[in-house]
Image (spheres, grey):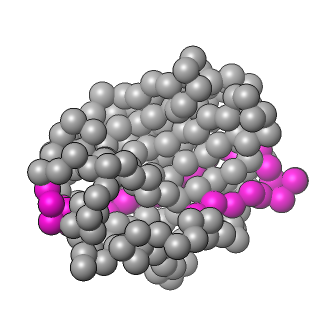
Amino acid sequence: MGWYPPNGESNLESFTSTYIVPQDPVNNQGSQVLFYFIGMQDNDDPNAVNIVQPVLTWGNGYTQWYVQSWACCPSNITVSSPPLFGLAAGNSLNGVISRSSDSTWKIDSIFNGKHTTLNAQVGDYIYNWADITLEVYSVDTCQDFASGKAFFNALTLIDSQGNVLTPSWQDISGSTLCGGDITANGANSYYIEHTQA
């Protein structure tokens, strides 16, 4: 899901959420990669689009849940913090994106009092799009997806004037594999879920 703020609120300053880790995939020894995240992008310059994101991950070299903070993906700024391990289904973690200066963003992923933090010097961009996303690679069957629901709770988006924004989130994914869906779960909360059949 994504959202473009109105012009007067288009310079986003911070985005935070509490994630709840879903159940492991049934096929927990596969080559699939599952990236769950909130993110902010600068979509004005097609040659320099980048995203800052605290990312809950299954796969990508590990058959377990872990979290990293990312700035991605132009070649000059694709960087990530060290992985933070020890997460399991039902655990909660905090994802924090905040502007530190005109050109620097602090992306912080926090679990059980431990931080994996990235201070990304990405340039003086206006971040004008926010998203809640599951990005996947090498998914061959429904059992490659996580079981159950991945929650994004306490979603809080603030602009550069200090205003707490109320996004009108738009589902941009359309039809997805295995009945994948993102669903509102009360105020400022959504979950992503797939069927296993």
Q: Quadrant of residue 144?
A: bottom left
Q: Is residue 109 above or below residue 19?
A: above
- Residue at coordinates 52% horizontally, 32% vertically from top-left? 72
Q: Residue 94: x and y, percent?
A: 38, 52
Q: Is residue 99 visible?
A: yes
Q: Quadrant of residue 140?
A: bottom left
Q: Residue furthest left?
A: 29
Q: Residue furthest front?
A: 140
Q: Is residue 97 above or below residue 15?
A: above
Q: Residue furthest top?
A: 76
- Residue at coordinates 70% horizontally, 28% vertically from top-left? 48
Could you tell me how many numbered marks the image carries? 0
Image quadrant holding the N terminus, namely bottom right
Q: Residue furthest right?
A: 8
Q: Residue 5: x and y, percent?
A: 77, 58
- Residue at coordinates 31% horizontally, 43% vertically from top-left? 67
Q: Residue 135: x and y, percent?
A: 44, 52
Q: Is residue 119 above or below residue 192?
A: above
Q: Is residue 114 visible?
A: no
Q: Nearer the viewer, residue 32 or 17?
A: 32
Image quadrant holding the C terminus, namely bottom left
Magenta-colored stretch includes residue 55: no
Magenta-colored stretch includes residue 8: yes
* Relative side of 190 to 15, left or right: left
- Residue at coordinates 49% horizontally, 42% vertically from top-left? 53
Q: Residue 148: x and y, percent?
A: 26, 74
Report the magenta residues as a range. Answer: 1-28
Q: Is residue 171 above or below residue 27?
A: below
